[in-house]
Amino acid sequence: MSILIYAEHDNKELKSETAKLVHAASQIGEDIDVLVAGHDCAAVAQAAANISGVSRVLVADASCYEYQLAENISGLVVELADGYSHILAAATTTGKNFMPRVAALKDVAQISDIIAVESADTFVRPIYAGNAIATVQSSDQLKVMTVRASAFDSATLGNAAPIEALTQAHDAGLSSFVSAELTVSERPELTAASVIISGGRGMQNGDNFALLNGIADKLGAAIGASRAAVDAGFVPNDMQVGQTGKIVAPQLYIAVGISGAIQHLAGMKDSKVIVAINKDEEAPIFQVADYGLVGDLFDILPQLEAAL
Amino acid sequence: MHNVNGNLYYININTNFARNTNEVDMKILVPVKRAIDYNVKVKVKADESNVDLANVKMSINPFCEIAVEEAIRLKESGIATEIVVVSIGTLACVEQIRTALALGADRGVHIQTDAELDSLQIAKLLKTVVDKESPDLVILGKQAIDSDNNQTGQMLAALTNMGQGTFASKVAVADGQVAVTREIDGGLQTVSLTLPAIVTTDLRLNEPRYASLPNIMKAKRKPIETIDADMLGVNLTSNVSLLKVSAPAQRSGGVKVADVAELVAKLKTEAKVIS
Ligand SMILES: Cc1cc2nc3c(=O)[nH]c(=O)nc-3n(C[C@H](O)[C@H](O)[C@H](O)COP(=O)(O)OP(=O)(O)OC[C@H]3O[C@@H](n4cnc5c(N)ncnc54)[C@H](O)[C@@H]3O)c2cc1C
């Protein structure tokens, strides 16, 4: 078993998903390489080399990888694929974007969003927005998989794996980067935060999301949202938690003015402790909440901030 | 001299441009999946062999519906000229093709098979349609809400060697290119692709319309071509087998607390998640 993990990063920082994938990979086999594909990403490679259990870090540093365009990254990964039995990427928008291309080019299936490893060929993954859990077995020679990082613990740090530079530059010439509008926030990222406070349609408008700020500051929390809050334009899309947004599993998830639709629950029901604040005592969110507080969020939020 | 030439040249560009936007045919292919209706909460069969879909309401997968709507809007704005919808699966899929035709697609292709297919086989079957129809744009849903795979569009893009704009919240076609604004984890990213290209839809791309009764009637007369999947030269056996489908661990609802003070006390001393 030889496993290649695609590192999740933004050229500057290695994201927390990668150490979780190393932990997932260690349940499959022991020979684990990490690929860092980007531009001016030496710091990322250093951080990856520090993860225990990593044998080698491969770095493909070229301008055509700067934005990790799927057409270019898949060409690179396909070229490396032959030495490996498994290729893993996080089920982030980067991994979801290029991995199916790799699978198709290698003529194998992709197994998406695994949450557990049963053996080197058998994996567990949620289907139907997490309302059913499938166990699947693959007989493909090469297993191409995306991993739900929140379902795995992190590998520890404290390693000095060798770093090798790759020289291949795969510019497919099919796509080009135009622009990005990235959310800049001092808060932890949703997928890495141990506490999350999310607002829904009940927040009524974007300005009212400020009511969550003070609480988030005190708890070191990330701020999330339901689809309804994003669709209504209260907050940007990258804050959406759910089946089609981010999947999170923090220690504490506080849902404020969120009804608890199955698509939202799909993104947060594996949180350790769930708190729901909602004025409707019949709201389905209370069926999954460890602690429910029925009442008007506009009264409760200021009290909560003061009490922390 | 120079000025006159320059002017003529300029006029030439304009006429070319007009021809490009008005006279060139632009075909859009929209694959749609028949899937469980998003309002239905699925149940697992007692023998854990799969989910139970008997007598469950089925619909067009919501993301595919957004793909159909986007194609129709491109046609209404004069950019696209023809919309072909394709669905792969049992005879029942014709229902979803008819729905797409009632919304405004022009004709349908039904690739008929009773086999349970993976995204890879679906992508290979779709490639045969792409080869035959030569669409300028293929718009698919980013994922189906049953398997939640999020693979088919990207696989089709790889097999046809096209560029891909996945998780689109905005699509702008001009001059042989499509600019796709993508919903990514960090925010939004816009990429430009040379046509033909593949786009997969995210939820905020548009809000699909409802079919009107006259259009539902009209859709009954729109053509649907049926193709036997076995005749397309694609190996339909999957290398992934489903061993078991189980119900997720149920969270038992907890307690209601009376006020903020009780909530904070419980989080500190009972749940121990804040200090
Ligand atoms: C294909 C598909 C994918 C989807 N993906 C996602 C997804 O990824 N994430 C997601 O979240 N949704 C998703 N949805 C949408 C989902 O079905 C729900 O529509 C959405 O989650 C509802 O958001 P909400 O709970 O904020 O709004 P609502 O359902 O409108 O609930 C608002 C809640 O706020 C409460 N409230 C109102 N005012 C107050 C007040 N003053 N004080 C206290 N409580 C108050 C109300 O009692 C109510 O319970 C998806 C839907 C589809 C079809």
Image (tube, coloured by chain):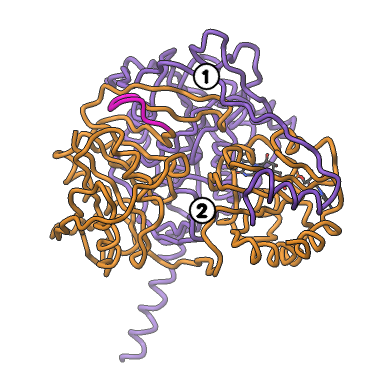
In the rendered view of the protein, which quadrant contains the N terminus of chain A? top left
The crowding category of the residue bearing disc 2, from other C-alpha atoms within 10 Å (few below 14, some 14 to 19, many at least 20), is: many
Let me know if residue B156 appears in the view. Answer: no
Tell which residue pokes out farthest to the front in this image: B269
On screen, A39 above or below A106? below
Q: Is mark 1 within 8 Å of ligand 1?
A: no
Question: Which residue is more in the foreground, A153 or B73?
Answer: A153
Picture coordinates of residue B164 (x, y %)?
A: 38, 49
Question: Which residue is more in the foreground, B201 or A11?
Answer: A11
Let me know if residue A92 appears in the view. Answer: yes
Picture quadrant where residue B14 is located: bottom left
Picture coordinates of residue A130 (x, y %)?
A: 55, 31
Chain A shown in which color? orange
Q: Name the chief secondary structure element in magenta.
A: strand
Distance from Cα at disc 1 to Cα at disc 2: 47 Å
* Chain depicted in purple: B
Residue A117 colored magenta? yes
- The residue located at (23%, 58%) in the rendering is A171
Question: Which residue is more in the foreground, B40 or A18?
Answer: A18
| Label disc, if present, on residue B246 of the rendered structure | 1
The crowding category of the residue bearing disc 1, from other C-alpha atoms within 10 Å (few below 14, some 14 to 19, many at least 20), is: many
Q: Magenta residues?
A: A116-122
Residue B74 colored magenta? no
In the rendered view of the protein, which quadrant contains the C terminus of chain A? bottom right
Q: Are marks 1 and 2 in contact (CB under 8 Å)?
A: no
- Give the structural element (helix, strand or loop) at label 2: loop
Picture quadrant where residue B59 is located: top right
Amino acid identity at mark 1: Ser
